[in-house]
């Protein structure tokens, strides 16, 4: 194992830059295409399910859970990813901030231009979907159905570009995404309203609701749209009033969704942090601190290994690794120990899950590594997380 002294200014930064260069080259050499964990319904075998939700779920989970990559023999091809492009754009912009190299700004804006052209075609406003159909315990949606999670995460990349360049086009696209979000169905309760995961029916999911609120709040900071702030506040009331006593959140309130995992909790924390900072509304500051305490206490082992679920080690998943690095780095301004934890988690992941060719492995099981290269779920998330960590380390070395 490498030994990192986070604030010596050299060792950690060199490790991160080397890893970033390798994964960046892998993504670009593969034309921004790759597999994803949930792409199994694009298999040749999908027609044999006859549209039966249970059978579709079996096929999807077979492809997703297999430690051996079945996709090449099942006709699942590497695809574009809107969320992958969004993560890469955000990572490029972070690298531009730390290096001032124009190539990173050029690559970021190229990704955002692609996203503008590849928004969901059945809506006037901007929103984004998967490039494959999906079935789960919550039902099914198609590649044409945009999702608030994707739309919010991508929307933040457009705001990043606006804040760096001042280009009004990028703010207009983020605002367009917000217009799509405010038209979503909402679960209305006496303790806040929950924005739906999808447009065509009400599906109440905490991370989706909080991500939407975070984008509305950040966009309103630039546009002055008070409706966005009001909807965001109601959304945060809904999710924060349902936070568990230990600081965690269920994935959602319905019994079938009552699990607690790493990366969705990270989405919740970063979204709440953004809401508080962008609105000045500190109503749920204690909820944020309680949630962060739970996150740090339950999703990282002493050696930096990220956990998927709060109560067991396996599977070790690359999406959770990327989100752990990003979440801890995002909170490093509040507590320098978070920066040290982020470095430790990044080092563990690089040492154990990055291939010599640059890509990050999908998962580690007790007896085997699933070495499949996912695009957004792995390469994009790690690129953005490591780029944010590199930026925070640079700021710390300068005493900022």
Image (cartoon, rainbow, N blue to C red):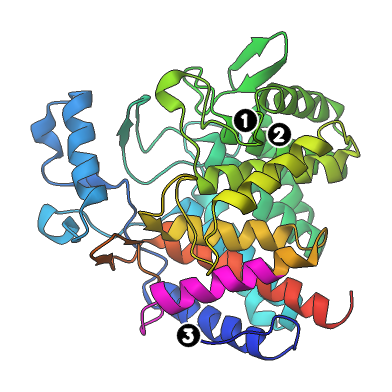
Report if the CB atoms under discs 1 and 2 are less than 8 Å apart. yes
- Identified at 47% across, 17% down, the residue is 201
* Whether residue 369 can be seen here: yes
* Residue assigned mark 2: 213
- Identified at 63% across, 67% down, the residue is 342
Note whether 393 is above or below 125 in the view shown: below
Note whether 248 is above or below 51 in the view shown: below
The 10 Å Cα crowd at callout 3, few under 14, some 14 to 19, many 20 or more, is few
Q: Which callout, 3 or 1, points to the residue nearer the camera?
A: 3
- Quadrant occupied by the C terminus: bottom right
- Identified at 53% across, 48% down, the residue is 263
- Look at the image and say whether residue 347 sits in the magenta stretch: yes
Q: Where's residue 70, x and y in %?
A: 16, 57
Residue 235 as seen in the image, left or right of residue 350? right
* Whether residue 109 can be seen here: no
Quarter of the image where one finds residue 137: top left
Principal secondary structure, stretch drawn in magenta: helix
In this view, the residue in front, 28 or 57, is 57
Q: Where's residue 294, x and y in %?
A: 64, 44
Q: Which of marks 2 and 3 is nearer the N terminus?
A: 3
Q: Which callout, 2 or 3, points to the residue nearer the camera?
A: 3
Residues under labels 3 and 1: Cα distance? Answer: 39 Å
* Residue assigned mark 3: 1
Residue 209 is marked as: 1
Query: Tag 3, which secondary structure?
Result: loop
Residues under labels 1 and 2: Cα distance? Answer: 6 Å
Q: Where's residue 193, x and y in %?
A: 68, 17
Residue segment shown in magenta: 340-359
Residue 330 as seen in the image, left or right of residue 85? right
- Look at the image and say whether residue 376 sits in the magenta stretch: no
Query: Tag 2, which secondary structure?
Result: helix
The 10 Å Cα crowd at callout 2, few under 14, some 14 to 19, many 20 or more, is many
């Amino acid at each position: 194992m490498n030994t990192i002294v986070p604030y010596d200014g050299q060792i950690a930064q060199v490790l991160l830059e080397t890893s970033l260069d390798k994964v960046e080259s892998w993504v670009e050499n593969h034309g921004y295409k790759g597999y994803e964990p949930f792409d199994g319904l694009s298999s040749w075998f999908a027609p044999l399910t006859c549209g039966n939700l249970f059978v579709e779920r079996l096929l999807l989970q077979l492809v997703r859970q297999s430690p051996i990559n079945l996709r090449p023999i099942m006709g699942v091809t590497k695809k574009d990813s809107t969320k992958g492009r969004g993560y890469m754009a955000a990572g490029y912009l972070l690298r531009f901030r730390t290096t001032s190299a124009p190539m990173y700004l050029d690559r970021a804006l190229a990704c955002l231009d692609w996203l503008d052209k590849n928004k969901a075609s059945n809506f006037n406003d901007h929103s984004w979907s998967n490039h494959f159909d999906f079935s789960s315990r919550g039902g099914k949606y198609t590649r044409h159905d945009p999702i608030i999670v994707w739309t919010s995460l991508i929307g933040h990349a457009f705001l990043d570009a606006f804040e760096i360049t001042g280009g009004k086009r990028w703010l207009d696209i983020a605002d367009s995404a917000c217009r799509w979000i405010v038209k979503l169905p909402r679960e209305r309760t006496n303790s806040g309203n929950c924005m739906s995961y999808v447009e065509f029916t009400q599906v109440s999911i905490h991370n989706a609701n909080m991500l939407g609120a975070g984008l509305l709040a950040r966009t309103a900071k630039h546009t002055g749209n008070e409706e966005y702030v009001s909807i965001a506040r109601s959304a945060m009331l809904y999710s924060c009033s349902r936070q568990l006593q230990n600081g965690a959140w269920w994935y959602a309130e319905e019994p079938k969704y009552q699990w607690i995992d790493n990366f969705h909790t990270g989405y919740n924390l970063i979204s709440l942090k953004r809401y508080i900072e962008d609105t000045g509304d500190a109503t749920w500051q204690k909820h944020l601190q309680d949630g962060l305490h739970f996150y740090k206490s339950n999703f990282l082992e002493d050696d930096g290994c990220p956990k998927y679920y709060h109560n067991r080690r396996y599977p070790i998943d690359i999406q959770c690794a990327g989100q752990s690095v990003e979440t801890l780095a995002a909170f490093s301004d509040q507590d320098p120990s978070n920066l040290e934890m982020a470095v430790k988690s990044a080092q563990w992941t690089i040492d154990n899950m990055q291939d010599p060719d640059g890509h990050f492995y999908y998962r580690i099981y007790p007896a085997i590594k699933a070495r499949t290269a996912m695009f957004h779920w792995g390469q994009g998330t790690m690129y953005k997380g490591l780029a944010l960590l590199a930026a925070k380390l640079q700021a710390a070395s300068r005493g900022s």
